[in-house]
Image: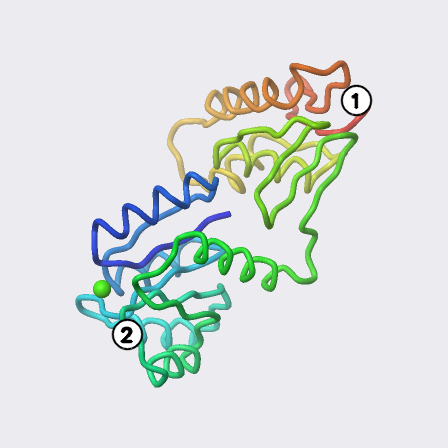
């Protein structure tokens, strides 16, 4: 789950980034409207947290331009502008939610979860293979009764394997869809293998039923039976 924060106040941007990363979201920060506009047009984000008073291009202008281009990413405006008229302007410009600064971080998290659920109303939000379960809305992963602590990358990697449950997942697919690095000079294979090994340790080391399988020279597969 990738979140873009567009916020020019460095302290707040860092605090948000750290708080969201602690919740296992992947986070990028843009300090200006232009940078935010550029990033959102070049990378896929699941959510955007947008400040309004930004240097250069105003947040509202950027939002109108993005919606005009057909961008459907859910946007939560996080602004010090607190009048009813401000909120109406923000929502009418294409925001999905509006929060006023100062704000309570747990409430921001709850609102983000609500946006994720709404955005994925017709999508699967829970995966279950054997006793491995992943809940995309709460970001919880469990194996049996054991809650697992995954990094953001491990979470994404596992989500990808679960979405392709029972299918072969090649390293090329992971490089492109999970690492999102297609135009790289050097191969990501070693990096991918290290992450798979770490994930496997967390998922499979304490149990007889192994779920992540390596297919030599081909890739990986998540399923109950060894392929
Ligand atoms: Ca600002």
Marks 1/2 in contact by CB < 8 Å: the verdict is no
Q: What residue appears at the point 34 percent right and 85 percent down from the top-left corner?
A: 85
Q: Quadrant of the C terminus?
A: top right
In space, the residues marked 1 and 2 are separated at their CA atoms by: 57 Å
Q: Which mark is residue 81?
A: 2
Observer-side mark, 1 or 2, equals: 2
Q: Nearer the viewer, residue 185 or 143?
A: 143
Relative placement, left or right, of 166 versus 181 is: right
Q: Is residue 226 above or below residue 80?
A: above
Task: For label 1, count other residues whose C-alpha is less than 10 Å away and answer few (under 14), some (14-19) or many (20+).
Answer: few
State left or right for residue 133 relative to residue 190: right
Q: Secondary structure at mark 1?
A: loop
Residue designated by label 1: 227
Ranked by sequence position, the earlier of labels 1 and 2 is 2
Residue 218 occupies quadrant: top right
Vertical order, 26 against 9 (above or below):
above
């Amino acid at each position: 789950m990738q979140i873009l924060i567009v916020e020019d106040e460095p302290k707040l941007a860092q605090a948000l980034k750290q708080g969201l990363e602690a919740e296992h979201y992947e986070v990028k920060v843009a300090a200006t409207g232009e940078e935010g506009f550029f990033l959102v047009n070049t990378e896929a984000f699941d959510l955007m947290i947008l400040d309004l008073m930004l240097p250069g291009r105003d947040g509202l202008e950027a939002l109108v331009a993005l919606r005009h281009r057909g961008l459907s990413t859910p946007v939560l405006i996080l602004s010090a502008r607190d009048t009813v008229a401000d909120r109406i302007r923000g929502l009418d410009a294409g925001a999905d939610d509006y929060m006023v600064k100062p704000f309570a971080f747990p409430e921001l998290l709850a609102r983000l979860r609500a946006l994720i659920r709404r955005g994925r109303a017709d999508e699967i939000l829970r995966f279950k293979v054997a006793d491995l379960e992943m809940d995309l809305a709460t970001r919880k992963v469990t194996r049996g009764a054991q809650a697992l602590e995954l990094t953001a990358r491990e979470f994404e990697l596992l989500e990808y394997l679960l979405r392709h449950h029972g299918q072969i997942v090649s390293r090329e697919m992971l490089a492109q869809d999970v690492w999102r690095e297609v135009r790289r000079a050097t191969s990501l294979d070693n990096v991918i293998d290290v992450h798979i090994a770490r994930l496997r340790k967390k998922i499979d080391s304490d149990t007889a039923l192994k779920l992540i399988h390596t297919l030599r020279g081909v890739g990986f597969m998540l399923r109950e039976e060894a392929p």
